[in-house]
Amino acid sequence: MSYISRQRQLSMRVLATGVLLCSCGCASSLLNLSGANAIGSKFAGMISGERQRVVRKEEDNDFGTKVETPLLREYISVTGNNLVALRGVGLVTGLDGTGGDLPPSHLRTELLEEMTRRGIKNPGHILASRNTAVVIVTAYLPAMVREDQRFDVRAVLPPNSEATSLKGGWLLETRLSEEQSISGRGNVKGHQYGMAHGAILTALGDGGSKKASPAMLRRGSIPGGAVSNTERNLKVILRNENRGLKTSKRIENVISGRLHDYNRFGQRISMAEAKTDLMIELKVHPLYRNNFPRYQQMIRSMAYKETDIGRRLRTEELAREIMEPETTERAALQLEAIGSDGIPFLKAALRSSNIEVRFHAAQALAYLEDSSGVEVLKQAAMEESAFRVYALAALSIISDADGVVALRELLSEESLETRYGAVRALKENNPNDPGLGTKVFPHKFVLHAIDTDVKPAVHVVRYRAPEVVVFGSRQELRLPAVLNVGNRIRVMGEAGDSKVTISKYSLGRDPERYVVSTNLVEIIHSVAGLGASYPDVVQMLLEADAQHNLAGELGIDRLPQAGRVFLRRSGASGTTEKETKLGTPSLTPGLFDRVEESEQDTTEEDSSSLARMFAARDTSDIEESAEVEESDAPTPDAVPESVNDEVTTEQEGTSRPDVSEQAPPGDAASDFEVEQAEFREPFTSRVRRIFTSPFQKEE
């Protein structure tokens, strides 16, 4: 039956009902009642409802041309991405007269009990030595940590300690546990999640400064000094309005259908498992092990429920959106979430004349295990600093020859940040790559001697792992030089000589002397063989840099960063430029992330940036509901929802050092903003509500 005939039939029924009422004796009295308006309203609603039903049916028969696919971001939040604060009390040995005892306190008592438990005799005498010191040990257990994975440790002298410096010290094995301060009970320890030990690195200053102050010598770090004895998975939490076992199971199937891995027996492992009607456990896929922000955003970009026709239509729409700079980032993420069916459209975007479009397409292809965008990622790392951290993270997971060759070529770039970023990415891709020139000194540090034709340089770090990278394996130490390598080793060379003398001094013994060439790599090998630790080698390099003995630059923590600004080119000719920020520092890929002490909130476990984002979203929802209850009419002070989201994102980013200007409104970083889900009443429910309450005026 056509729409016109249905409309005509309904109108005739309404007319007949009106004639019948008028013919009754009570018709006039009924129409004088206040319910007359309700009757008229219901008749109008019946006509309107029939019209909507017919239009909806015609839309359904239109082969889905107006399908709007719900994404998982409307149903879930991802948790478990926070850092867990761990603490312990440890003993530092090997101090050269700069140690000292600690006055009676709970820290001293705790350490004495630990030493007694380990069977150490005369613990009080050991603590009173000028060569030992009691320290507070702090570490942050990363999100998605695996068993035996290493993470950084920090040691600091208590305020009332008699010790003055930790330089040259070695932290003995220390238990790291959760700790909570409870009123009336003091500090209560929780689970033990790691063990820490190693040589303490001091004197690198703040932010890479090469000068140390007395206060800075009272604290230090051990890169990769802690070992995890646990694993942490993520959790997907359903929002309250979507809670249910059926929904939980559907989301499990959506994620597991797109992401899976294999164990050592070749058995398939699903990445998601529904535990309750509210929570789904989410494992970390190997491709995203060093880029949690990308993992979280890709999962939230998956379709919750979609027909084959709907996917085809959405894919075609995304293929158009990815070619536009303003929408390319979001479209690339959704095509990546679709999986292999999105690869042809991403490859087509590689032919765009816009570098931003090509970059986002190449990045998505890398996480789909397709190397078609390697050259684009290499170009992005070389030419655009805002793209560099993401490009290198993507190259680190491309295991075929093209990706490895691209990273090796980046080792010869002029920018030290690009060169060291390529080292870390190549090391993640293949730790045994011959291009890294790796030499491991057990329990000390790792040396990378890299052959390059560009200007020589040396790089050291305070985070992740103790490693020295020498760019230009043939570079020579300039003479004259007198360099201290810790408290027991010294390197000396006269002007005009082609060799240096390395001396090791020991109490009550004649010095050991060795003569080696001025080659920097050979000198590092020699001092490490004499027992020099990572902090000792760093001290030598700092002194050499201060005395201009190095042939090139000495870099400290030259890590690519997120949240930088680039010029977005748009328009038909690409001449329109707009400053745009890509990502935020707090959402840096884990491969290049670093945790500063000042950035941590150790009072609560859920202090991560994403937890704050979702907390802000919930607060925004509550405030919005309160405003609606107060008044249905908009007020002059009302702020649009998009503005609130943007402000929340910017405030969240201030917890980390900002490396660029604030992003202008409406930039591409909106993928990392909190999105508000809009839930509408189903059409059939609305019709049922109207006809089951015939004399209640619809609001």
Image: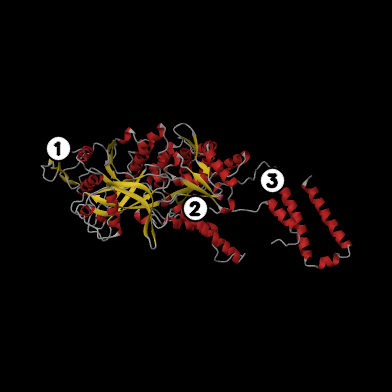
Q: Earlier in the sequence, mark 1 or mark 3?
A: 3
- Determine the CA span between mark 1 and mark 3: 86 Å
As drawn, the label of residue 59 is 3
Against 153, is 697 above or below? below
Q: Which residue is mark 1?
A: 515
Residue 31: name its quadrant. bottom right
Amino acid at circle 3: Glu
Q: Are marks 3 and 2 in contact (CB under 8 Å)?
A: no
Relative image position of residue 650 (x, y in whole percent): 45, 56
- Asked which secondary structure carries label 3, the reply is helix
Tell me the amino acid under the disc marked 1: Val
Tell me what residue is drawn at x 48 percent, y 55 percent.
613
Nearer-the-camera pick, 179 or 96: 179
Label 3 or label 2, whichever comes before in sequence order: 3
In the rendered structure, which amino acid carries the disc numbered 2? Glu
- In the picture, measured across the screen, residue 500 lies left or right of residue 646, that is left
- Indicate the quadrant where residue 15 lies: bottom right
Q: Mark 1 vs mark 2: which is more N-terminal?
A: 1
**Residue 169 pos. (x, y %):** 23, 49
> Relative to the observer, which residue lies in front, 298 or 88?
88
Quarter of the C terminus within the rendering: bottom right
Residue 666 or 272: which is nearer the viewer? Answer: 272
Q: Is residue 613 left or right of residue 193?
A: right
Q: Nearer the viewer, residue 185 or 28?
A: 185
Q: Residue under circle 2? A: 673
